[in-house]
Image (cartoon, helix red, strand yellow):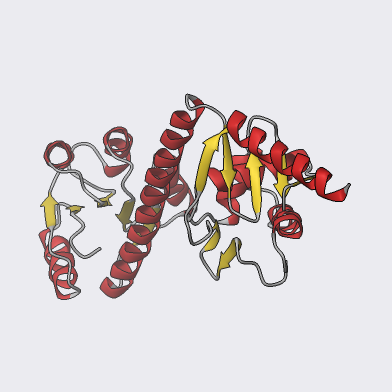
């Protein structure tokens, strides 16, 4: 985080000097300054900043005027600095694209704390977006692949037939329970938060409470686990999320048709033994 490039836009040299000094003492290594809207635009054209500190009262065009133009170039957090502290001024700052509004005079260490908070949030969003993009790419690739049977030893998930088999026997599985299990089968050993699972399987923003996902996780475990209260396949990594763990021998995927033929053979053999 400390190597994140930061731009300070303020025409008061005492302010920029103070902020640069404090930020360097706090370990930040890449700090640029600009004294006008024009200099800020030029700097943003050269460098992809992770965060911008923007004074409201700049010579020529104000920070409020330039903020929308900067926002078109970057989604980095923009923190306003201003001696104007009315509610109207603050709301205007947020309306034009600002992410925070810090009143002058300010405590430099508070500014550093706000910077770190914004950078953490921004980096999390960037990582989540990158992860979702990777998952989407995998999903698109999966669409052009033939339907599979995902074989976990104890149970098999037949994508083509829409069927879950446990111990060689078909097990009733509601549609959303099956879709959630199938999604996890397609991404073995990958951690997902409850919010990510809700968005990927239900196709909606995760406004629903966590109970929806938890109920479906429980229903899957009831079907695939020998002991649902001590799961071996669908496991929870505390504080991080859920993942589906293949058996030690690795996940076995076969073409849906051949796998169903094999399973049918198992049923036939079971029938002959019964007679």
In screen coordinates, is 106 left or right of 134? left
In screen coordinates, is 143 left or right of 18? right
Q: Position of residue 178 (x, y in %)?
A: 70, 42
Q: Is residue 41 above or below residue 237?
A: above
Residue name at image x 21 percent, y 65 percent: 2
Q: Position of residue 267 (x, y in %)?
A: 76, 42
Q: Is residue 205 something one can see in this rendering?
A: no
Q: Is residue 164 above or below residue 117?
A: above
Q: Is residue 120 something one can see in this rendering?
A: yes
Residue name at image x 59 percent, y 48 percent: 197
Q: Position of residue 28 (x, y in %)?
A: 17, 66
Residue name at image x 56 percent, y 46 percent: 185
Q: Position of residue 73 (x, y in %)?
A: 26, 34
Residue name at image x 48 percent, y 56 percent: 189
Q: In the depicted view, which residue is nearer to us: 274 or 114?
A: 274
In screen coordinates, is 87 left or right of 270? left
Q: In the depicted view, which residue is nearer to us: 139 or 109?
A: 139
Total numbered labels: 0
* The N terminus - image quarter: bottom left
In screen coordinates, is 28 left or right of 191? left
Q: Is residue 231 above or below residue 78?
A: below
Spot the residue most to the top.
Answer: 144
């Amino acid at each position: 985080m400390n190597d994140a490039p930061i731009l300070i836009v303020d025409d008061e040299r005492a302010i920029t000097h103070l902020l640069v000094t404090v930020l360097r003492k706090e370990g930040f290594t890449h700090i640029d300054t600009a004294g006008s809207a024009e200099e800020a635009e030029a700097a943003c054209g050269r460098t992809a900043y992770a965060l911008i500190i923007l004074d409201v009262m700049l010579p020529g065009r104000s920070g409020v005027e330039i903020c929308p133009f900067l926002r078109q170039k970057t989604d980095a957090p923009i923190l306003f600095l201003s001696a104007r502290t009315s509610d109207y001024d603050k709301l205007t700052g947020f309306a034009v694209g600002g992410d925070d509004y810090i009143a002058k005079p300010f405590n430099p260490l508070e500014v550093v704390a706000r910077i770190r908070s914004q950078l953490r949030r921004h980096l999390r969003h960037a990582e989540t977006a990158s992860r979702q993009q990777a998952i989407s790419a995998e999903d698109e690739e999966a669409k052009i692949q033939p339907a599979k049977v995902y074989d976990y030893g104890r149970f098999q998930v037949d994508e083509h037939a829409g069927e879950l088999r446990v111990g060689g026997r078909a097990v009733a599985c509601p549609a959303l329970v099956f879709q959630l299990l199938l999604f996890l089968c397609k991404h073995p050993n990958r951690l997902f938060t409850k919010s990510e699972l809700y968005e990927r399987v239900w196709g909606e923003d995760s406004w629903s409470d966590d109970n929806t996902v938890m109920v479906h996780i429980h229903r899957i475990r009831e079907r695939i686990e020998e002991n649902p209260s001590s799961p071996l396949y669908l496991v929870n990594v505390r504080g991080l999320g859920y993942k589906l763990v293949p058996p030690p021998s690795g996940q076995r995927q076969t073409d849906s048709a051949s796998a169903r033929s094999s399973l049918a053979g198992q049923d036939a053999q079971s029938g002959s033994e019964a007679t």
